[in-house]
Every structure is written in C-alpha cells, then in structure tokens.
Image (spheres, grey):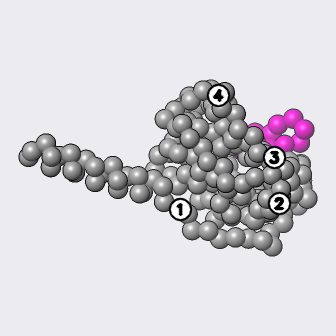
Amino acid sequence: MNLKKILGYLIVLVALFLAFFYRKPQITLRPREHNVVRSPAFGRVLKIQEEPGDHLFIAIFLSPLDIHYQVSPVNGVIRQVDYDASGKFELAYNETKSRMNEKSIIYIDTPHGTFTLYQIAGFLVRRIDTYVRPRDRVTSGELIGLIKFGSRVDLIIPKASQFKLLTQEGDYLRGSDSVIGHYL
C-alpha cells in the first residue's frame, strides 16, 4: 500500500469517529414534569453523596464512547452561568482531582430550589460549549451544552431530604430517558 492510500483511510477513520462522537441525542421534552429529576448526561454514575445544606451530589462520567451533549435535568429558569477557565485538565473519572478542572457552572432555579450543574473538562478536552444564558427558560430534556471528548457532569440537587433517589453508583444513565429521582 502506498502512503496516500494509508493517509486516505486514516482520514476516513478519523471522520467516522468524529461523526460518531458528536452525534446528538434524541430529544424528548417534558414540560409537565415538575417533581421529576432526569439525568443531564449520558454516562456512568461515579459517585453519589449527601452534602452540607441538604444537597445531594451526583457525579456522572462520560467516556469517549458516550454522547457528550448535556440536557436540562429539570424545568426551570437559568439564574446564572459561570465559566471557570483557571482550572486544570486532569482525568475526568478521578473525582477528587477533576474538581479543579476547567468547567462551566449552570444554576437552574426551580420551585424546589436551585440546581447546580457542572460541565467539567477532562484530560483531552479544551472546549466546553454552554448553550443557555441567564433568564433562559429550560424544559427537562432540552439541550443545554456539549463537552468535547472525555469529561464529567456533576449535578447538585437541593432539598435532598425531600428527594427520593432512584439511581445508584455504577448505573448507566441515558440522558433525559433516565430518571435520577423525584420529590416527595
């Protein structure tokens, strides 16, 4: 085989991988669900823990084979979007190190309180796209962002004492098709 043919195959392989990687999820909007919290991401639950102030923390790891778009887990209004570009680019599945990674932080106001969603860049990532802005109304299941290549999404749920968790560490979540839990 000559070098041009090998290069041609390599370009086709890279193009196919990128087309697979940037595939968009099927969107199902759920405007009438007010007590249900759905997964904001496609990936595996790394960690679930209670946090001070009656909050529940959920970390979801997105492998390079997962869909990397994020969706709103709830119906609400975007209060604030912050971008922290001062962070590092540690491995996203290492929960303790990756908390210091570059990230976008989205605050969603709901009748149950403010949900906080972190789009966290991974080791190879240098780009996070956040599609929402303050005062935008979002519907559960609506696209709100994209993290390019390996990454993690963290969700902080308010009023954890009034929340029934339906997922556990190790579960694979399929975006808004997966219910994390609901308010009692």
Q: Which residue is mark 3?
A: 80
Q: Which image quarter holds the C terminus?
A: bottom right
Q: Which residue is mark 1?
A: 24
Q: Which residue is mark 4?
A: 87
From which residue to which does the magenta span run? 49-61
Q: Earlier in the sequence, mark 3 or mark 4?
A: 3
Q: CA distance from mark 3 to mark 4?
A: 19 Å
Residue 12 in picture, x, y percent from top left: 28, 54
Residue 46, can we see it? no
Amino acid at the residue labelled 3: Gln
Q: Residues within 10 Å of mark 1 (few under 14, many from 20)?
A: some
Q: Residue at x 89, y 42 (%)?
A: 54
Is 66 left or right of 101, judged from the image as shown?
A: left
Secondary structure at numbered mark 4? loop
Residue 158 in picture, x, y percent from top left: 86, 48
Q: Are marks 1 and 2 in contact (CB under 8 Å)?
A: no
Residue 80, can we see it? yes
Count of numbered circles on the image: 4
Q: Residues within 10 Å of mark 4 (few under 14, many from 20)?
A: some
Q: Does the magenta stretch mainly form a helix, a strand or a loop?
A: strand
Secondary structure at numbered mark 3? strand
Q: Earlier in the sequence, mark 1 or mark 3?
A: 1
Q: Are marks 1 and 3 in contact (CB under 8 Å)?
A: no
Q: Residue at x 66, y 37 (%)?
A: 103
Q: What is the number of the mark on residue 76?
A: 2
Q: Nearer the viewer, mark 3 or mark 2?
A: 3
